[in-house]
Amino acid sequence: MEKLGLFGGSFNPIHTGHLRAAEEVREALGLDRVIFVPAADPPHKAPAELAPVAHRLAMARLATAQHKAFEVSDFEAARPEKSYSIFTIQHFRETAAAGSALFFLVGADAFAEIATWRRWREALAAAIFVVMTRPGSRVAKPADALPADFAARYKKQATGVYATPAGARLLFQPVTGLDIASSDIRRRLAEGRSIRYLVPNTVAHYIAAHRLYVSDQ
């Protein structure tokens, strides 16, 4: 049985924090692959802040190229509609090998807003959600993000592991608290400051070559 991780996001740009969190989840859960899925038109992001998705895909591919278990999918980037997680989960559920276990990686801050996601109940039932928590995260259990009546369906199975009688599972997985944010990287670039060690060198070179996130664009 393959254990497949899906890691969605705007990746605007992808940075070391994304990569380290994915690696720690991969190792902790024994995932065979982690697929990064850059969103073309994420519903919770302002379009004006986003670099063109072709650039974000290219940067994700550069960042993951040296890791044999990391891949990048253009599934959301190729869709004409907004990037909703339920459609991505359904796509990989349908295309994965029979018997595969599907894990959906999401940051604690994003999971805090899950009740605003389209068809979020279906999404929770369609994959094992892995909520990546860092020291000080305000989300550490289902009741911290889900409506009370829905959260009550989840019963604690072990430390950080919750499940419903119907089989839905939520995992709260601690990851190293690297204080790196794409918004801060964009701000540094706009101010002409260094982003060395915040992103892989290949990504930094790509950003410079294409003059992404600079203030004169």
Image (spheres, rainbow, N blue to C red):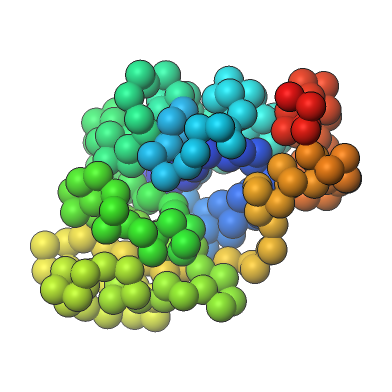
Which residue of the protein is positioned furthest toward the front in this rendering?
216
Picture coordinates of residue 155, whole percent (x, y):
21, 78
Identify which residue, 3 or 183, lies in the foreground.
Answer: 183
Q: Residue at x 32, y 57 (%)?
A: 114
Q: In the image, is residue 97 above or below residue 25?
A: above
Q: Quadrant of the C terminus?
A: top right
Q: Residue at x 11, y 69 (%)?
A: 165
Residue 71 appears in the picture as rendered: no
- Left/right placement of residue 215 relative to residue 94 reads right
Q: How many marks?
A: 0
Picture coordinates of residue 214, whole percent (x, y):
78, 32
Identify which residue, 102 or 51, lies in the foreground.
Answer: 51
Q: Residue at x 27, y 41 (%)?
A: 86
Q: Quadrant of residue 171?
A: bottom left
Q: Quadrant of residue 65?
A: top right
- Left/right placement of residue 48 relative to residue 216 reads left
Identify which residue, 164 or 209, lies in the foreground.
Answer: 209
Q: Residue at x 61, y 29 (%)?
A: 51
Picture coordinates of residue 210, whole percent (x, y):
77, 21
Residue 69 appears in the picture as rendered: yes
Picture coordinates of residue 142, whole percent (x, y):
30, 72
Q: Quadrant of the N terminus?
A: top left
Q: In the image, is residue 131 above or below residue 57?
A: below
- Left/right placement of residue 68 relative to residue 119 reads right
